[in-house]
Image: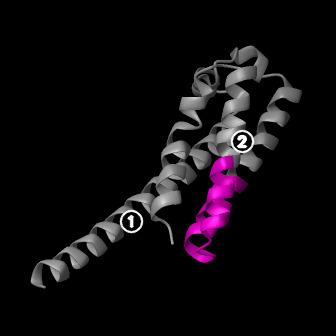
Amino acid sequence: MMNRTYDSHHQHHQGEVMTILTDIIIVLVAIEFGYIFYLETAVPDSERTAGVFGMDINELRRPAMKNAMKNQGVYNLGIGILLLLAVFAFRSKAMVISLLAYIIFVALYGSFTVNKSIILKQGGLAIIALILSIFFLH
């Protein structure tokens, strides 16, 4: 009987740890999208932005491209904020999974249309977060 109680408590504790780990990974995904917002909106024509996105800096300095980058940055910030709201305000597993699936879909699309590494760069953490969310979010 004592072993069963211990095992039950131990499994509950492991579940809590995994839920916290899942939350941390989701927060990292949101931070990543905040960083993308920063690159695309605050410094769209910087060397760093050019390097991260593999783009020519002269192309990024074109006014139309700067505006497009800034617009895209706002979308990315919105995704990050929605992800945080889904986890901490709404506590909605369905919303978290939907947002993470969307992030992965966009990263997959980018890996086919722009650069193969986008699936790992933009989607890597989201893939881990999605798997953890399916099993450990309540």
Q: Name the image quarter holding residue 22.
A: bottom left
Pick the front one: 16 or 39: 16
Real-space Cα distance between discs 2 and 1?
A: 31 Å
Horizontal placement of 27 versus 112: left or right?
left
Quadrant (top left/top right/bottom left/bottom right) for the N terminus = bottom left
Give the colouring mode of the picture: one colour
Q: Residues within 10 Å of mark 2 (few under 14, many from 20)?
A: many
What segment is highlighted magenta in the picture? 78-101
Q: Residue at x 66, y 19 (%)?
A: 115
Q: Position of residue 120 (x, y in %)?
A: 54, 30
- In this rendering, the answer to whether 66 lies above or below 116 is below
Q: Residue furthest front?
A: 1
- In this rendering, the answer to whether 111 lies above or below 25 is above
Disc 1: which residue? 20
Q: Amino acid at mark 2?
A: Thr
Say which label, 2 or 1, has the lower sequence index.
1
Badge 2 marks a residue whose secondary structure is helix
Residue 100 showing in the rendered view: yes
52 magenta-colored: no
Q: Position of residue 62 (x, y in %)?
A: 83, 22
Disc 2: which residue? 41
Pick the front one: 58 or 122: 122
